[in-house]
Structure formats: structure tokens, C-alpha cells
Image (spheres, helix red, strand yellow):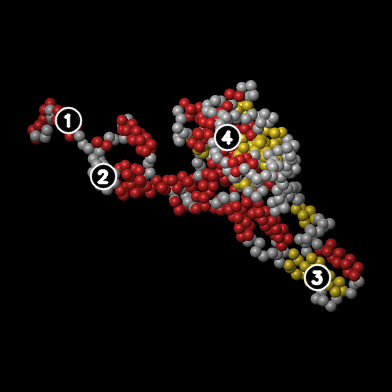
Amino acid sequence: MSQLFGYSLERAKKGQSVGPSFVSKESDDAATPVAGGGYFGTAIDLDGTFKDENDLIRRYRSMSIHPECDRAIDDVVNEAIAGDIDDTPVDVELSNLKVSSGIKKKIRDEFMNVLRLLDFDKKAYDIFRRWYIDGKLYYHKLIDPKNPRRGITELRYVDPRKIRKVVEMERNKDKQQLDPRTLESQLSPRTAEYYVYNPKGLRAGMETSGLKIAPDAIAFCHSGLKDMNKNVVMSHLHKAIKALNQLRMIEDSLVIYRLSRAPERRIFYIDVGNLPKQKAEQYLREVMSRYRNKLVYNADTGEIRDDRKFMSMLEDFWLPRREGGRGTEITTLPGGQNLGELEDVKYFQRKLYRALNVPESRLESESSFNLGRAAEITRDEVKFQKFVTRLRKKFSELLHDLLKTQLILKGVISLEEWDDMSEHIQYDFIADNYFSELKEKEMLTERLNLVTAMDPFAGRYFSLEYIRRQVLRHTDAEMKEIDKQMQKEIEDGKLPDPASIDPATGMPLEDPAAMGEEGMEEEQEISLDNVEPADYKRGEF
């Protein structure tokens, strides 16, 4: 790997910890396998439309410009990347990681550095949208070769059309029987893995002409959709190619039909008598120029002018008629009927949204939902939320790789420690789905209603801990935290002390001692010095 451009993360030398296998390890990044020392080339034929993978990416980008497709993509990205001005779209979750608080603090600090390198607070929408459309996302990790412990100093975006991962396979020329003990190494002896970069773009048959880059110097994240037959990573827009093409054709044909059939045109039958053919045609042209008016409106200048030298397909028809007919006649050709029906267009729009996993209800701009009604939570919205969650998990692989490089370069953890800790490091995206929020509120309301119904039986058939665990679904950590908060609020006087509350009525208990003292104070205030003479005589004191 020393001949490759960039750097590599070294792993401690260990013996082989797994036994032999008769199948090669599957590559999840759609790397192109080549024979070492030879040449290679890839070609993709998707229904005879695309020549290679680069043409496929260009098709995805052209699809994203279409209004309906752009709107659907915008819905997906807005649900996946949310956040206010003061909030970071994503944060690292370390609650399941069993390390010291100091290590957790360093991991959080380095994760914030990764977000700063990506400028994620400002460019999160653009980064996620670019990944969703292309299906691939590459970043070159730049480090200071003189001081690698500084970590990543800069991240630069790499166009997916100019870079590709390659796995060199050693060509086995020995045709003897395979040894079962070394079967896996004989089937797939991987000698090197690297990325090939060509600033002019990688086209079919030209993949070897470029710069070889070490795999650890590139941060790569793909969509997770892969054509196993062609070993091609596809975008989530791939299954919408046919639906979008059909929608475009329907809309174009609709415009042409309306332009050609919308106006009512007249048919003029001109009686030419017994005139010869040339004389009849000349007479017809004279009548046309005499009675035909062609007023043209110029939208730029607002002028109306008579333009008779141009003729279009939407003008009237002039037909000659010989002697013996009904003479000169004018009839009307009706325009097209049912021009206001758009059911076919709406069908293909809904089909496009279904292909992009976006709920069809979001297609209608006037559609709305009322917060506080569980009936508005449709099944499509629940499925859409699960789809967005899967996208977030797949996109977090980019952040995971960058965080790994940053922690290892700065010496926070080793490469072996990362293998044990990586599965416990998760990423929490800010939720901005109103339907999911509505669902949680409705579930909490139903739980509180059940608690109210079970309250008379608390202490008889149900314990308080059972109600909190089974009905309210509180975990041990939540119960401990809630009890701690309630105790603090009681000490601060924000909540009344449960000992001073009547359990039967829920009203505060009266302190007889306090009541007695108040009565004594009132009696002490009454003395003969304060009694009026008239009241004294009547005994009213």
C-alpha cells in the first residue's frame, strides 16, 4: 500500500482468528474486481439506455430538476434533515457505550469537529440531497503529513463520476485441485484495495487511467441499493425512471392535443363553378386573402397586428366546390371534448410519488392534517417515517467513518478498540415529523386515561411500580430521574408534600395546631378597650 496516494490506518499484527471458508467475503461497496497486473472495464446496459455508471448518475441529476420529482425529493430531505437555528441536525448518542466520561467527552468533541469540517449546520440539506440523488458520496480526508495527530484538517467533495473503488484479485493459474485448508484464499486472494481517481471522468474501458488512492483516505457512503447482477450501486431515484418518463410523455401529449384541438375552426366551401384547375386555385386564394383575418398579439410589446403571410395548422380550412354542389357554404368544426379531464396525469403523478416512497397525500397542496387527531395518521405516513429512518441510518455511515479516522489519528482510541466500540456509537437526528409527534401524543393520552381508570385499584390489585412500568412504560433510569426531579420540586416548594395531602379527597390537610393558634390570636385581639359603649350595653362584644 506504500505506492498509493494518501494514508492508511495500521492495525496491530494478529494471527488469523477465523477458520477457512469456501466462499469469498461479500463486498458491500460495489467495488470493481480486477485481475492484478491486467486491465479491466465495466459496462452497464439498463434497457439499452445507459452506457455506463456515469450516464446513470447524469440521468439521476436530470430527474431531480423535474418539478414533481424535485418536490418529492424535497419532502424526503426535509424529513431527514431537520433543525432550528440553534440546533444541530445530528448528535452522537453514547448512552450504550461502556467507557469513562472523559472518553465520551473526547468522542463528542471530535464529532463536533467532524460536523465543523463538513459545515454540517449550514450545508446539511445540500449534503444529504446530493447523496440521495447520486446514490454515492465521496470525501477526501486531508491530513498534515508532518503532524498526523492533528487529525483531519479538511474535507473535500469528490464527484462520484470521477472516482471508483477497485479490488485487485490475484490470478490463479494453477489448475490443480483446490486445497480445502486454503480454499478461501485461492478463490478470492485480494492483494490490494484502492480508489481510482481521474479528473476527466471514468468511462467504460478507461478505469485504469488515474491516480490510485488509499482506501482510508476516502470517506465513502452509498445508498444501500445495489444491482447484484451488474454490481452497480443505484440511487433511490432509480425505480422512478420509468414513472417519470411516462409522466413527461403524458404531459407533452396533453399539451399538443389541447393546442391542436382546443380552438373551433371553420370550413369554407367556395363555389368555383366551371373554372379550370389553375383558375379555380387562383380564385380560392383571392377569396382567402380577402376574408381571412389573422390578428397576432405580441406579449412583449402589447401590440396587435395583422399577419397574413404566416399560416398555421390552427387556422380555418378553405375548400373548393364545383358547380352542381350547394354553392358557397361555411360550417364549424367543433373543438376537442373533455379537455378538462386530468385523471391520467394525476395517475402517473401518484405513481411517481409511490416510486419515490413519498405519501400520495403530499401531492395535493390543499391537503392538510389536524394536530390532535389520531385519525389523520395514515399508514403511508408511518411507512414514510420508517423509510426516512432507514435513510438516516445509512447516511450516518459517512459520519461514522469520519469519526473513526478522527479518533484514531488523535490517539483517543486504537483501531482495535474502535472495532469493539463502533456498534455502541449511534447518531441521533432531530425529528421533525408532525405525524410521529402526533402519534406519540395520542399514545401518551391513552396511557394516562388507562392510569386514571386504574387509580382506584392502586394498592389493591396493582402496585404503583407496576402501573409505571407496564402502563406508562417507564424504564428504571426514567423512574429514578423522575423521582429525583419530583423530590427537588417538593423541596423548592413547586409541588406540595404528599404527606400534607388527603389521599381520599386530594385536598390539603388542615393543621389543627395552626387553626388553634389563629383562633387564639383572634380572641386576643378582642378586648374591652376596643368595644363601643352602645355595643357594651347590648352585650355585642
Q: Is residue 305 visible?
A: yes
Q: Disc 3 designates what residue?
A: 269
Mark 3: secondary structure:
strand
The amino acid type, in three-letter code, at marker 4 is Asp
| Label whose residue precedes the other's in the sequence (4 or 3) | 3
Mark 1: secondary structure:
helix
Nearer to us: label 3 or label 1? 1
Residue 239, given in percent of the width and then of the height, sits at: 62, 51
Res 164 quadrant in image = top right
Labels 4 & 3 near each other (Cβ < 8 A): no
| Label whose residue precedes the other's in the sequence (3 or 2) | 3
Nearer to us: label 1 or label 2? 2
The amino acid type, in three-letter code, at marker 2 is Gly
Are there few (<14), some (14-19), or many (20+) residues within 10 Å of tag 1?
few
Residue name at image x 75 percent, y 47 percent: 301
Q: Residue furthest bottom?
A: 324
Measured in 3D between alpha carbons, the distance from the residue under mark 3 to the one under mark 2, in whole angstroms, is: 100 Å
The amino acid type, in three-letter code, at marker 1 is Glu
| Label whose residue precedes the other's in the sequence (3 or 1) | 3
Residue 480, given in percent of the width and then of the height, sits at: 35, 35
Nearer to us: label 1 or label 4? 4
Q: Which mark is residue 401?
A: 4
